[in-house]
Image (cartoon, rainbow, N blue to C red):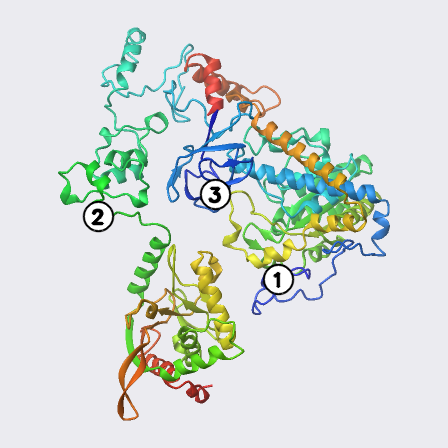
Amino acid sequence: MIKEFRLPDLGEGLTESEIVSWKVAVGDTVSLNQVIAEVETAKAVVELPSPFAGVIAALHEQPGTVVEVGKPIVSFEVPDDAGASPAGAAPAEAETPKRQPNLVGYGAVVESSGRPARRQRNFGTPAVKSVGTQPAATPAVEPAETKAAETHSFERPRSTPPVRKLAKDLGVELAAVPGTGVHGLITREDVRNHVGGGDVPVAARHLSAVSDAAAPAGRTAAQGGREVRTPIKGVRKFTAAAMVASAFTAPHATEFLTVDVTPTMDLLAKLKTSRAFADHRLTPLTLVAKAVLVALRRNPSLNSRWDEANQEIVQFNYVNLGIAAATPRGLTVPNIKDAEAMSLLELSEALTALTETARAGKTAPAELADGTISITNIGVFGIDAGTPILNPGEAAILAVGAVRKMPWAFQDEVALRQVMTLSLSFDHRLVDGEQGSRFLADVGAILADPGMVLTMV
Amino acid sequence: MSTDETGQGGTAGTPAGSAGSHSGSGRNLIQLITPEGERISHPEFDPWVKDIGDEQLCSLFEDLTVVRRIDVEATALQRQGELGLWPPLLGQEAAQTGSARALRSDDFVFSSYRENGVAYCRGVGLTDILRVWRGNAASGWDPYTVNMATPQIIIGAQTLHATGYAMGIQNDGADSVAVTYFGDGATSEGDVNEAMVFAASFQVPVVFFCSNNHWAISEPVRLQSHVQLADRAAGFGIPSLRVDGNDVLAVMAATRVALDRARHGGGPTFIEAVTYRMGPHTTADDPTRYRDANELEDWAAKDPIERIKTLLDRKGLFTDQFQQHVRDKADEVARELRAGCIGMPEPEPLDVFKHVYSSPNSWLDRQQDHYARYLASFGDPAEATSQEGAR
């Protein structure tokens, strides 16, 4: 026998949750309380334990889908004598409800004895019938009218403000959408289905282009339209908000410096073969990070924060070094805490750990908070330079370009050298051109000749 | 940095700032079983548990295991939509079991919502424990059948009830004790402080059992108190004990000391049981947002059940037969809990009027009459009722 498991309210008063991943597949045999899915609510990511022992008959929702509480998400094939059904499987929801809901406090106010009058909701009939004035006629007419009522609607279709907004955005006339929610409520899904997405997951759904409006929506949806619409949410939404906030509060200035980093690359090769770094992942980025840390000591204004609320400039005597990382969920900038106190070895370990954690999507919130300056490694994409946007709240960000072999003036001759461009954006409220330039020149000087560190520390 | 020297690793390296020192404090924890499962002697507290032999140790292990199983099963039931909410006690089994098992049946418990392990030890029915969390009743059981009040949701309010009850015991000239359970966060509440003032003033037989699980939802205890919580009691003139809350034997010894003092007219005692909330505050909370994973790992190494398991193993008591017995018991309890939860009858709509006044009230009667007629307007009253209940 098939038993359905409906998405429960996993927090207190939540209306929906997102299926993050399924831990089981159709056909799997599961035991009671075995974890079957990971679900993200507005409050937490939680694991769902199986309410039955049996075989997975169907998974109704794709990972990445936001599901309303109460919707079936998985069906189980269970032995017939298995335990009682869960309360989550609300009984009789599919049937047409007999009662007409009434807001608490608005009903049953009549003092007279007998059957109390009740606010009549008209789902179909024009409001010509007056309950108060023609009580005798009412009982006779009512049954027929209520039946007819179900076919078409005269009241505004029942829905919620966000769904009405969605319908408006998609150009959908709500009156034409059949509601499948409680008491015929039109849900977000109903609107989407009406547009023609069917069961395709939201994130992958292709909607027809506006210019293509004449074509049947179903065709373009099936073949992949001229536009792909992806809901703005999660990391993308957060990143966008942060970028906009940063770009329009901090006046950005960007400077570029192209450096012959051949000596740094030689040093890197030497270190890689040394015993101390035998098991470590050493990259140009490690040395750039170290150079930044050294240069910051001489140019502390780049390691500061504009505290608008208190009208103060906060200069940090520590460096929480942010590293922009492309992760499966989008851009994040985890930072290495107290990086200024680290040896090169510790720094390389911290960098490795940070990128691995970020790639696995397991970066903890604490690692993302309280950064003081950031590095973004655009060189890994083969890019030379750019104008990076500051990580909000920080005074500077350095973009590290690709290392290229280029003809370069070397000892008064043209030689093939390894060259890299550094792009530094800084908050011009906190950092003047002089300080920014000195900092960038320092970083460049170290990379051009690592021995220069001796003059700086 | 942290309020205990048992190693709240996550904060050890934080730069000097907030809770740097517990000046003049730093009492050692009372401990009888180490996290490594070694029974260590303590001249002051050994005598209080000298009656706990092998059989009793096994029985304590069984209770700890069953309490954990109840908690895990209830957490799963919440995730399956069978409970509205559940406050997990994972990691606090020893603090609850060790103290509850030290009580006499005529002692009276006033607990917070997390003491479901205490409720089990007091003999509260498994289904009754879940009743409120399923939203089926305003309260789960009759307090007088087990001498334990139903859980208090208001943080710390139960300490006042306990002190008041203890004043009653004093007036009766009885030798029972009121025991109140609360968390570290509750010590910042006015109620707890008022309760302690009154308890000290009247020297009433009450035990303040504070389960310091280190987190008041997302607020770490080091932010709430710059001294050890046990040291706060001194300001009220209440003697205190600071015990390893993950050591069931030490908790039992400390509770017995406090109970003995109360029974013999010595007045209140404050016990700080240093433990850790391994799970979320409730099933609606996500501790990974505010808590360091390393801290969790440090405390996992101090698990209350693991250490007594190792101890039993060393004594040659952790036999296959015993393990099977405990497993069977836990399975049986889990089965009963689940069946009781799912099979709980839904309340009737008119039940809401039942527990307002003990005697008839005309205003309420009128409201009930209106509501009954409103329900009747849906046709067959029985059907309307069942629909309402099924909701």
Identify the residue at horizontal 23%, vertical 44% (top origin): A224
Instruction: Nearest to the eye among marks 2 and 3: give it.
Output: 3
Q: Are marks 2 and 1 on the same chain?
A: no
Instruction: Give the CA distance from mark 2 to mark 1.
Output: 51 Å
Q: Secondary structure at mark 2?
A: loop
Q: Is B69 displayed left or right of A196 in the figure?
A: right
Residue A60: give x, y in percent of width and height.
Answer: 39, 35
Label 2 chain ID:
A
Instruction: Give the CA distance from mark 2 to mark 3.
Output: 32 Å
Residue B219: give x, y in percent of width and height.
Answer: 55, 54
Name the kind of residue labelled 1 in the image: Gly
* Disc 1: CA contacts within 10 A as few (<14), some (14-19) or many (>=20): some
Q: Which mark is residue A376?
A: none
Is residue A79 in view?
Answer: yes
Q: Is B160 displayed left or right of A455 in the figure?
A: right
Residue holding disc 2: A227
Whether residue A138 is situated above or below residue B99 in the rendered picture: above
Q: Secondary structure at mark 3?
A: loop
Residue holding disc 1: B9
Identify the residue at horizontal 46%, vertical 15% (top origin): B383
Nearer-N-terminus badge (2/3): 3
Q: Which mark is residue A23?
A: 3
Q: Is B147 displayed left or right of A195 in the figure?
A: right
Q: Are marks 2 and 3 in contact (CB under 8 Å)?
A: no
Whether residue A344 is situated above or below residue B137 in the rendered picture: below
* Disc 3: CA contacts within 10 A as few (<14), some (14-19) or many (>=20): few
Identify the residue at horizontal 47%, vertical 67% (top origin): A352
